[in-house]
């Protein structure tokens, strides 16, 4: 019987997997984040950690857990909260949850594209604040998506699923990616791989789907916004720091770009105060994977990863 520490509240079916495997579960049972000091105590003696993306898994946490630790099973596809190198150097396997949140996240990306380009946030605020309004020929006009170009930054599973949705709305697809996508996928999406400069210059909407790493820190900054069309939108469902938020505020306020749809922020849960002043920014609180089905699938996959490692088997989705 291994000690499994679950650092945040997760859906019951995932806890059931861990229990059925016969492990001793120590699970934080509140949606409030556990204070770090307490977390450092909680992880002591764990053979498996099931972590949320709000938990920083670094040397300090790994040391606090101890040498018996075998696996860190992150309940997220993004794993910038985990120092994977530090895990490897201790022989700890880290896992994530790819695949199961692809559609939910692409849905949110498409929703943000629609909300930003059709000014739905502004419209909602007008109604809710009981601001007088009237149908008008030129009232709150946005931009249509048909025959426009979506630039996908990072054509992984979520980028491709977003592109598929955009195709259904009549958009053409450009993408930039470290490697060329399969020809079958390119053909299906009628997608063309271009360099970042071309993508910035030609896209009417840019949607970010790259992982966050030092290489993608502030990938979108002042220069990049200046290179976009003034009629273009930027959408981020990846990780906040891929965008330089201060530069984005400037670009939104000066009209350098038309609008933004953000699900993620540079310093979550803080939001740059300048963004709050931008009517042309749609801001939602990191909801990419927030459906009951998806969160359950993510947590059960993380539990499967933990159980497999504890049983001496290959986990289904290790971070490579
Ligand atoms: C959510 O942001 C995730 O990475 O799973």
Image (cartoon, helix red, strand yellow):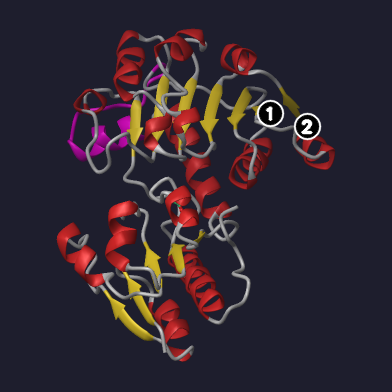
Vertical order, 264 against 30 (above or below):
above
Q: Position of residue 59 (x, y in %)?
A: 33, 52
SS class of the residue under badge 1? strand
* In the image, residue 291 lies in the stretch drawn in magenta: no
Q: Which residue is mark 2?
A: 190
Tell me which residue sits at (45%, 59%) in the image. 90
Whichever of callouts 2 and 1 sits on the residue coming sooner in the sequence is 1
Q: Which residue is mark 1?
A: 173
The answer to whether the residue labelled 2 contacts the one labelled 1, judged by CB atoms less than 8 Å apart, is yes
* In the image, residue 125 lies in the stretch drawn in magenta: yes
Q: Quadrant of residue 285?
A: top left
Magenta stretch, residue numbers? 120-138
Vertical order, 58 against 300 (above or below):
above
Q: CA distance from mark 2 to mark 1?
A: 7 Å
For this view, does 279 lie left or right of residue 239?
A: left
For this view, does 74 lie left or right of residue 124?
A: right
Q: Quadrant of the N terminus?
A: bottom left
Tell me which residue sits at (62%, 68%) in the image. 316
Badge 1: residue crowd in 10 Å (few <14, some 14–19, many ≥20): many
Q: For residue 38, say whether it is visible.
A: yes
Which residue occupies the foreground of this view, 86 or 150? 86
Vertical order, 101 against 250 (above or below):
below
Which residue occupies the foreground of this view, 273 or 139? 273
Which residue occupies the foreground of this view, 26 or 44? 44
Q: Position of residue 3 (x, y in %)?
A: 36, 81
Which residue occupies the foreground of this view, 290 or 258? 290
Q: Position of residue 102 (x, y in %)?
A: 57, 53
Q: Quadrant of residue 163?
A: top right
SS class of the residue under badge 2? loop
Q: Which mark, by number, is residue 118? A: none
């Amino acid at each position: 019987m291994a000690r499994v520490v679950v650092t945040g509240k997760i859906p019951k079916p995932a806890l059931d997997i861990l229990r059925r495997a016969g492990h001793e579960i120590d699970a934080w049972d509140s949606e409030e984040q556990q204070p770090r000091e307490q977390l450092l105590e909680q992880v002591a003696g764990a053979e498996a950690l099931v972590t949320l993306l709000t938990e920083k898994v670094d040397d300090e946490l790994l040391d606090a857990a101890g040498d018996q630790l075998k696996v860190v099973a992150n309940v997220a596809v993004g794993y910038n909260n985990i120092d994977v190198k530090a895990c490897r150097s201790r022989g700890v396997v880290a896992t994530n949850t790819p695949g199961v949140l692809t559609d939910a996240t692409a849905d949110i990306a498409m929703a943000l594209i629609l909300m930003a380009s059709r000014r739905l946030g502004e419209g909602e605020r007008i109604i809710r604040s009981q601001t007088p309004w009237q149908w008008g020929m030129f009232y709150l006009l946005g931009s249509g998506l048909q025959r426009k170009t979506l630039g996908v930054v990072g054509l992984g599973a979520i980028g491709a699923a977003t592109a598929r949705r955009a195709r259904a709305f009549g958009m053409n697809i450009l993408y930039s990616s470290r490697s060329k996508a399969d020809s079958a996928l390119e053909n299906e999406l009628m997608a063309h791989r271009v360099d970042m400069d071309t993508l910035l210059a030609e896209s009417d909407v840019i949607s970010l789907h790259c992982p966050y790493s030092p290489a993608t820190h502030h990938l979108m900054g002042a220069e990049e916004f200046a290179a976009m069309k003034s009629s273009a939108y930027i959408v981020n469902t990846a990780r906040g720091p891929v965008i330089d938020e201060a530069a984005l505020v400037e670009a939104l306020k000066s009209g350098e770009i038309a609008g933004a749809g953000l699900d993620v922020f540079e310093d979550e849960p803080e939001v740059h105060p300048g963004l709050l002043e931008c009517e042309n920014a749609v801001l939602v609180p990191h909801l990419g994977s927030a459906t009951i089905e998806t969160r359950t699938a993510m947590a059960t996959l993380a539990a499967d990863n933990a159980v497999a490692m504890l049983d001496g088997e290959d986990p289904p989705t290790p971070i490579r």
